[in-house]
Image (cartoon, grey):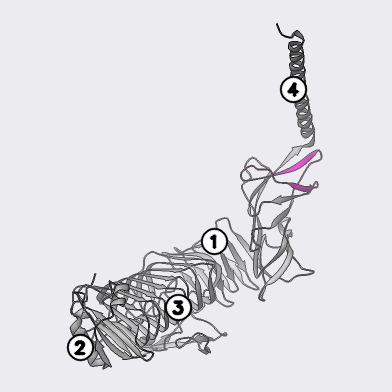
Amino acid sequence: MRGYAVAIAVLAAVAAILVPLASDDGDAALTDDYPDADIIISQGTVSTLVVTYVDSEGKTSTQTYSAGSDLELAKLSDIDGSLSVVMASGTVGSLTLVDIDDASAENTVDIDFLMVSGSASEIVAVSSSVSLPSSYSSAFNAVGTLTMDIRGDVTELCTTTCMVGIGTLSISVGSGSEIDRLYPTGEDGTYGEVTLVLEGGDVGYLTNRSAVVSYMTYELRAGSVRYLCLGADSEGGSSILSGLWTFYVQVDASFCISSAVTVGRAVLGSGLTDIPSILCNGESPSAVFSRNIVIDAPAHTIAMDSCFYSGTSSALSLSGYVIGGTVNSQQVSSSCYVPSYGSSVPTYGDGGIWTASRGGTVEAGTALYVGCCLTVASGAELDVAAGGLLVNSGIVSVSGVMNSSGTVVNNGYLEEVDSGSVDAEFTGTGYLATCIYTRTTDGRIDVMTSEYSAVVLRYTGDSLTFSSATVRLTGVGAVIVVSSDSDMSGTLFTAAVGTADAGSYLDAWTVSVGGFGSSVSVQVTMAVEIPEGYRGRIVDSTGAEMEVLSYTESSIVFAAEGSGTYYFETVSVDADEIAHRQLVLNSAIAAAIVIVAAVAVYFLLRHDRGRGPA
């Protein structure tokens, strides 16, 4: 429905600012293609841009501008309920959808923007030409719902440039689009709910800046992101407080990244586990009591850093990044001047804006769900505080230190890399693993550890190709051999053996392998005790018997059906023979019955034939 009631006033305002080349009646074909649009942007000639306005009665008029012109499409005071804008084609400089010209309005508006094609150097959904409240708690709630569907090319997409309140924000990036810098929550403001969906396209730099968000959801399904920051890049702004990017999530955040998405580098960023102590406007963040941070990205590696480190004390400077362009580095900030204090405070650490630039703390009331490879750099700490919860279903790769006085549920791998250490008690079905940087010999991987029951095999090159992998876990008396009829390849693989509740069986183990592919054979050797006169028997969790390849009095080798739980028992060889003889006897009796029946039938038939006709 059209809510753009005062189109004439808007035309006058825009004409005064932009000085159009000409005006004309609207393009009927465009309004037919986009019947709900209030404003349609399209290419005119090669060097012109046409803006078509549709009033509340369906009447159209157009303005023509030079291609690449800056456009401001509407004033807030002229919108009656909602505004729908379509960019069908053309080249725009800076495109502003709505300018707030009246901060006294009580009703919110809904804004819908569809970019079908074309290009823009900048797209801003909401800006302000009047003074607005500067507090997050009293932000001017101008927008109820803001929907942006981007399918063209944009140098910078920044939702807002002012302290504005938005109820629901939905951004979708389509296939074929190219966005150099994407700031989903803009420069500032408050948001009730934010959803970003990547359906395709190529995004250069994706980060938040200084907004306060209640609920955030990312669904990255296809396409690529060169530099992905889930929270805010703490080194993206300036070193003065008003220029810091102090974004944070108040309640829940969920990030789902498909294996179909190509990610160059990814960091957790600030504002998720690490809430700033001071916001860029000098306020303290609102109290946070219970939060859930969920990362579902099993094919991806995400660094637990607040910025993109390029060295031990330098970080990438990406605020001007364009796809394919060069990337500069800068020193990581050490202090920040706070006007209300009259002095500077550390940017990171005790008494600082953030607790750390690398690693971080899962504070009381926060639950962090890790479904990716989350890396903790050397020299950094991941701390689960009392009252905090970390649930891991992926790999937490620790080159620094992981401590916990809270709760850790590990259903994946806690990996100690080089001199890294995990000092945390945990529950769950997962493993404490060591990292082994692997290579091949004659096309095969062969590694051993005597201290761990699990390994994470890493290859630092592009890809490692091999025909089989043997993992010797001598500390638990186990050997896992993974093989395939065709070559296997990759850069990260896992293998582990753990204990399980044996129940009525003699022993039970969990076997886990990952990264090798689906069409592989898994052979497991376990240390056991098999008395003389007995043989070993292995069943899986369904009771299905596994093939035993060989056994001795101290070990058994069996073919496993991939990852799962396997149970061991011994069976008397004599009992086997008795059972075998009984089976043979039963078969013989059954065969004799069949033969006797057949003979009886034969004689009955012969007797009937001998009698002849009556």
Foreground residue among 274 and 111: 111
Q: Position of residue 329 (x, y in %)?
A: 52, 89
Instruction: Name the residue rendered at 62%, 69% in the picture.
Output: 416
Q: Position of residue 263 (x, y in %)?
A: 53, 75
Q: Is residue 156 one of those drawn in magenta?
A: no
Q: Are marks 4 and 3 in contact (CB under 8 Å)?
A: no
CA gap between label 4 and label 2 equals 103 Å
Relative to 478, 46 lies left or right: left
> Would you call the spot at circle 3 few (<14 residues within 10 Å), some (14-19), or many (20 or more)?
many
Foreground residue among 39 and 259: 39
Q: Position of residue 517 (x, y in %)?
A: 64, 61
The tag earlier along the polypeptide, 4 or 1, is 1
CA gap between label 3 and label 1 equals 33 Å
Q: Is residue 204 visible?
A: yes
Q: Are marks 4 and 2 in contact (CB under 8 Å)?
A: no
The tag earlier along the polypeptide, 3 or 1, is 3
Q: Quadrant of residue 273?
A: bottom left
Q: Amino acid at mark 3?
A: Ser
Mark 4 sits on what residue?
Answer: 594
Q: SS class of the residue under badge 4? A: helix
The tag earlier along the polypeptide, 4 or 3, is 3
Mark 3 sits on what residue?
Answer: 177
The correct choice, above or below, for 393 with respect to 138 in the image is above
Q: Which residues are magenta?
A: 529-555
Q: Amino acid at mark 4?
A: Val
Q: Marks 2 and 1: which is nearer the front?
A: 2
